[in-house]
Amino acid sequence: MRRNRVIAGTTALLLAVTGLWAASLAIGGGEAPQSTATLSPDSLPSPNKPRVPAPDVRIAAVGDMNGVRNIEPNSPSGRNGAAITRLVQKNQIDAFLGLGDFQYDTPRCADYVKYWTPLWGGTKPKLYWVSAPNHDWQPGRNEDLDNFMNGQCPGAPAKAAINRQRGFIGNGDPYSKDFGNWHFAFLSSAQWRYSPAKAQALTAWLDGDLAAARAAGKYLAVVYHEPYFTSNTGEHKRAADHKPWIDVMYKHRVRLTLSGSQHNYERSCPVNNRDQCVSDGMTAFQVSTGGIGLRSFTSSPPYIVKRFSNTHGFLRMTLRDNGSFSWNFVPTSGPGKDAGTRPAP
């Protein structure tokens, strides 16, 4: 008798649950599935289940790419463009980060199409770009970089990778992108020169963007054209007006920054916002060796641990799920080399 009561009670409970489930579907406008699968213990969510590691992220990066009216394949620019294009075609990198000053000197659509595209156009399928202050964008003078990257310049319909994903991105607009377990913020240094008020607004945007990514467990990187952690040259000093960005970057413990502009190569120690080498600082790479004439250094800041000004080439990096990363500078003309690994925090 007891067994019959248990069975009857169980049946009633199942009917009640089924009725509630059907009612909820009706309220929500859903449809009952055609079949159901039996849940096994392995298929149930478990707070103790380990997170599946994100895959390694392979990137290439360089800035200051192509000279005025240059279409020579054997030029430093041509060799770099061809080498990175091969990496794209063979799927050996996940992203190419264009660090600004794509085409010299004051490029419009026709210049990108006629000069940059023959040497570098093959990188567009994996290209993530930043607006640059010196040559690619000056309001009222040359404002076509955003059109070119979105495939809107006549004769160059291909879109950069980020534009295929996000649509049109205006010159000076920030954006961020996750690669594996890494979060990259892309900023326009040009705003400090042309619109300091917008640059300050970008500071607030960066603060919120990095805070959200850090809360989600991502490791952080920032890409911008004019470097803050850099040696002086005869043409440029550090971008001191970028200090509010640097303060925000260190506040959120950015691990990695990438910049260009100087026409040489530099790497810093892990550095904080007070120019001190610290274990939780950001490793700043300045990679402006894409093909423009190289410049010598005129100062020696203590936070710069590797540099050279006699070699064209580009940077390759592998970013790992645990926050560690490795780098290798690939020379295409000249003797300069740099390689290493930063361990996980």
Image (spheres, rainbow, N blue to C red):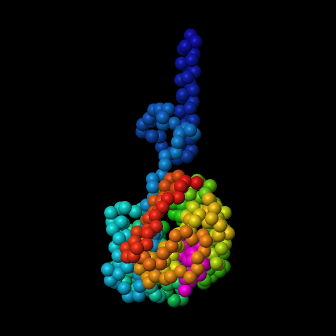
What's the residue at 66%, 63% (across, down)? 251
- Quadrant location of residue 68? bottom left
Residue range corresponding to the magenta coloring: 223-239
Quadrant of the drawing holding the N terminus: top right
- Quadrant location of residue 95? bottom left
What's the residue at 57%, 44% (across, down)? 27
Quadrant of the drawing holding the C terminus: bottom right
Percent x, y for residue 134?
52, 84
What's the residue at 50%, 32% (across, down)? 41
Q: Is residue 83 left or right of residue 52?
A: left
Q: Nearer the viewer, residue 4 or 264?
A: 264
Percent x, y for residue 228?
60, 74
Q: Is residue 101 left or right of residue 5?
A: left
Percent x, y for residue 26?
54, 43
Q: How many marks?
A: 0
Residue 237 part of the magenta-drawn span: yes
Residue 209 visible, this angle? no
Residue furthest top in the image = 1
What's the residue at 57%, 61% (across, down)? 255
- Quadrant location of residue 271? bottom right
Residue 86 visible, this angle? yes
Q: Nearer the viewer, residue 13 or 100?
A: 100
